[in-house]
Image (cartoon, rainbow, N blue to C red):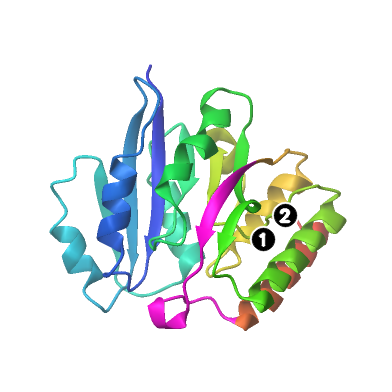
Amino acid sequence: MAKMVSFVIPAYNERLYIGDVVRALDKVALPHGVRRELIVVDDGSTDGTADYLEEMRGVDSLRIHRLAKNGGKGSALRVGFSITQGDVIIVCDADTEYSPDDVPQVLEPILAERASIVYGSRFLGDISGMKLANRIANRILTMAANLLFRASITDEATAYKAFDRRVLSSINLNCTGFEFCPEVTAKILKRGYKIYEVPIKYEARGVKEGKKIKWQDGFIAIWTLIKYRFVD
């Protein structure tokens, strides 16, 4: 049976960018015979994102799931994961910080059965526009993950994370907000899985362009890594 890739895209007030992201991911080159589904979970948007998505129903691979109330990125992702049909699942943000051109190289190790988890590393690739404070915060989070779980990754908080469905389905996630990244990283490393990394490009956006993560989320991420080091 042909494999399928599920792109899970949580979206909250991303009307300006979601159309470009969906169209770009719909055109991403996949190996011959590999099918795709684009699952956009609208996380209670109030800016017209849902209405804009309805206008995109003509995209054959697109599936839209709308949440009545904003619950956070982690909540939207968990809903998205629960309705996927793919053999491989990749998380994609609903903005344009990450390049869809990098998706094939993130997926390739899993589709070729050389890895079961792949992270697209910004720090192995090309970063532009990231503030020094954000660079430091990302480095601290990655160092914490490596120290706590004896790993050797370079980018814990990257948005491009791809999983063999069987691995992701075996993990019980509790996240509601941006702590998805540290929770899933902690739980897969604690189970002994190896994270394979590939270089990607990253072009940061600011609060004025719609970036929603806050400095408080960094402390939550550190606590999440520590918590799941000692709690199942």
Question: Would you identify the image quadrant in which residue 158 lies?
Answer: bottom right
- Answer whether residue 224 is visible to the viewer in this image: yes
In terms of depth relative to the viewer, which is nearer, 122 or 34?
A: 122
Residue 220, image x, y percentages = 67, 75
Residue located beneath label 1 in the image: 182
The residue shown at (73%, 38%) is 194
Tell me the SS state at disc 2.
helix
The residue located at (75%, 55%) in the rendering is 232
Q: Furthest-top residue in view?
A: 1
Q: Magenta segment, which residues?
A: 198-214
Mark 2–mark 1 CB contact (< 8 Å): yes
Quarter of the picture containing the N terminus is: top left
Element class at badge 1: helix
Q: Nearer the viewer, residue 103 or 227?
A: 103
Marks 2 and 1, how far apart in space? 6 Å
Residue carrying label 2:
186
Task: From the viewer's perspective, tell me whether residue 193 is left or right of residue 160.
Answer: right
Q: Is residue 95 above or below residue 85?
A: below
Instruction: Where is residue 19? Give x, y as percent.
Output: 25, 58
